[in-house]
Amino acid sequence: MISLMSLPYAQHALEPHLSEKTIQFHYGKHHKGYVDTLNTLILGTPYETQNLEDIIRTSYKKDEKIFNNAAQIWNHDFYWSSLTPHPMLPKGTLLHALQRDFGSLEAFLEAFLALGLSQFGSGWCWLVKDVKGTLSVVKTSNADLPWIHGLTPLLTCDVWEHAYYLDYQNLRKDYMVALRTLFNWEFAEKNLANEIL
Ligand code: MN
């Protein structure tokens, strides 16, 4: 049984960048929908007693429906944690790593934006760390996620249309630029110390 995570802030807290209505649908309908569907799918199967990461690992390339719903739950948990209503900037070790691997914070933001805009159809844009500790940006399609490919995620942006359509219609770029104000750099810095799951 997998639970829907509690949002780390109120549903209106990310306004005006993300409206309460967007969160109500994105968290309350889409994210919750993946949780409800997964719990129905795993009922009475060996997946039932596994944690979310193990369900993702076990179902990868074996059970597409279970993988897609489980990975989407993980991705959304990570997405909500990547955002904060309290504006902040990267500092310390993380800022240093961004400057080392992208040249500057601004260069990272531009690379992240360009990659997110280049994702054709639904997917995710990520700041990741490889096994050598080097940062880069990667995109994944649909429910796919970096750690199954050996990369540690630090921060993500959901580029499925449901993430921005109510607030920005087809303007993914405006949504991604607005999200810069909401990035939780403390969460990213915490993830910098993580090894791959
Ligand atoms: Mn989403």
Image (cartoon, rainbow, N blue to C red):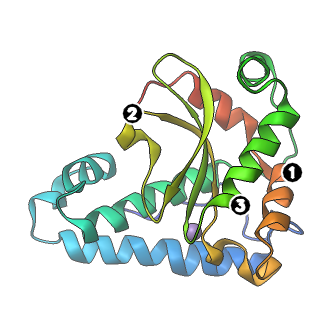
The answer to which quarter of the image holds residue 123 is bottom right
At x 33%, y 77%, the residue is 37
In the image, is 77 to the left or to the right of 178?
left
CA separation in Å, label 1 and label 3: 18 Å
Is residue 1 in sight in this rendering? no
Ligand 1's image quarter is: bottom right
Mark 2 element type: loop
Mark 1 element type: helix
Is residue 67 in sight in this rendering? yes
Which residue was labeled with disc 1? Answer: 181
N-term-proximal mark, 1 vs 2: 2
Q: Is residue 182 above or below residue 154?
A: below
Residue type at the position of mark 1: Thr
Contact check, label 1 and label 3, Cβ < 8 Å: no
Q: Nearer the viewer, residue 29 or 120?
A: 120
Residue 100 screen position, x and y as percent: 74, 17
CA separation in Å, label 2 and label 3: 24 Å
Residue 117 badge: 3
> Tag count in the figure?
3
Which residue was labeled with disc 2? Answer: 150
